Image (cartoon, helix red, strand yellow):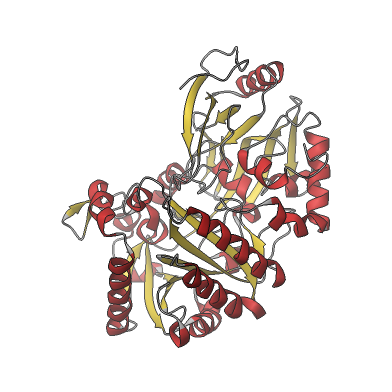
Amino acid sequence: MALPAARHLTLPGASWEDVCAWGLVTRSASWVCRPRTVDEIRQVFAAARAASLSVGLRGGGQSYGDAALNAGNVCLDLTDMNRILAWDPDRGIAVTEPGVTIQQLCRSIVGQGWWPYVVTGTMFSTLGGCAAMNVHGKNHWKVGPIGDHILDFDLLLPTGEIRRCSREENVDLFHAAIGGFGMLGCFTRLTLRVQKVPSGWLRVEPIPVRNLDEMIAVFEERKDAADYLVGWVDGFPLGAATGRGLVHRATHVPAEEDPDPRRGFGPEVQRLPGAILGLVPAQLAWRIVRPFLRDPEVRLVNAVRYHLGRLEGHRVRRESHTRFSFLLNRMPNWQHAYGRHGLVEYQSFIPAAHAAHVFRAQIGLAHEAGVIPYMGIFKRHRPDAFLMSYAVDGFSLGLDFKLTPRNRERIRALAARLDRLVLEAGGRFYFAKDSTLTPESFAPCLAEERVRLFLAMKRACDPEGLLETDLFRRIFRDVQGAS
């Protein structure tokens, strides 16, 4: 890859690399720097400023779109800042650097009977990235996003100043940087509380549902007695069967029902199996699936999965925390099964009163556009106090679309129509998944007080506009003084 003209970074260890989004939809070349200390981050900031380059922050690179890309500029990769600085097993409080992954944290604490309150569907997200996106899990309606369990953090501003933030100190910045998608500063230390769990097992009940209305009803009926809830949606049926699928309700297995707790918390149980169905090596599974990821085959597989779920009924099974939580890691690199152009996940968050109508309409519009979602993931949510929150008192539906050269423009046009539905319903968008949102679609959000306050804080914390990403430029490019 040729270096761009007049774009030189005089910093030891910086390399010009091609950086790809997790969903394979977008990629861009940039200077990649991998600091190990706070002083080295300051050096990157200074070198980028001297070269008139912007800096984008990157953790585990698990965002589907361009949230951690910074084309032609600097990508600050924080994965080498991956030390657990302190762990208090009596109170369940961990102090970490931003590059510590969920996997690393879980492995360090699960043997002592602890588990994070919030984990993503992949174990490879970093805690700094999780805080920047304020991620949620399958228990969002119950425990909130990860920000609700961060006690404090140190934030390195582009000016070189470090601010200690908590619910008592620099409160406004605390609630803006969590969920601020890396635009205010760089997390250098985070203090996180985790939960004590009674055993290493969950009791998982699959519940078949015939449509979206039934799925919503099951969530509402079961949420008070569940620790986790997640729905799988078959995107192919329409009409009365729109949104049919399976709800998985999980509850903690009580300690008295675990005859061998040491084993349950141990690595033998808390690791993912190395083979699919005990036969296909997990690392190779995506290569086997890839030729069959087409409409007829996926329609058949989804139908079989749904009807087997109905035959199985509500038969409860036990799963480890790891197996239930990290669905995306059961088939490593599964995004490659979608082909070299990857996948787009369109995830929107809709207030409860409008969710069924909006999600039904979204699936219908996708069929009308000739791009059927191969999978849908359904969750329950609650509001929170963070400035750039995506959360509502309602539901989210993430729809996965296979991207090809032939359907790229259709998906882009479809996303714009889906955006209008979301905005009309008072819904919100999630930057960790987004790869389609435009300034035109996001424009109504700019009138919200929370967004105006966030952009004002961006100007205060980053007066030179040093921190940018492809996502920030894509969505906020028409905002005067946004950077």
Q: Residue at x 42, y 85 (%)?
A: 210
Vertical side of 262 occupied by 333: above or below: above
Quadrant in the picture for the C terminus: top right
Residue 365, image x and y in percent? 53, 72
Quadrant in the picture for the N terminus: top left
Residue 209, image x and y in percent? 42, 83
Residue 229, can we see it?
A: no
On the picture, is 467 further left or further right than 401? right
Vertical side of 434 occupied by 378: above or below: below
- In the depicted view, which residue is nearer to us: 75 or 383? 75
Q: Residue at x 58, y 79 (%)?
A: 356
Vertical side of 353 occupied by 145: above or below: above
Q: Residue furthest bottom?
A: 240
Residue 350, can we see it?
A: yes
Q: Residue furthest left?
A: 279
Residue 465, image x and y in percent? 75, 32
Q: Residue at x 29, y 61 (%)?
A: 260
Residue 163, image x and y in percent? 75, 34
- In the depicted view, which residue is nearer to us: 382 or 69? 69
Vertical side of 219 occupied by 285: above or below: above
- In the depicted view, which residue is nearer to us: 18 or 94? 18
Residue 182 figure quarter = top right
Number of numbered discs on residues = 0
Q: Residue at x 45, y 67 (%)?
A: 370
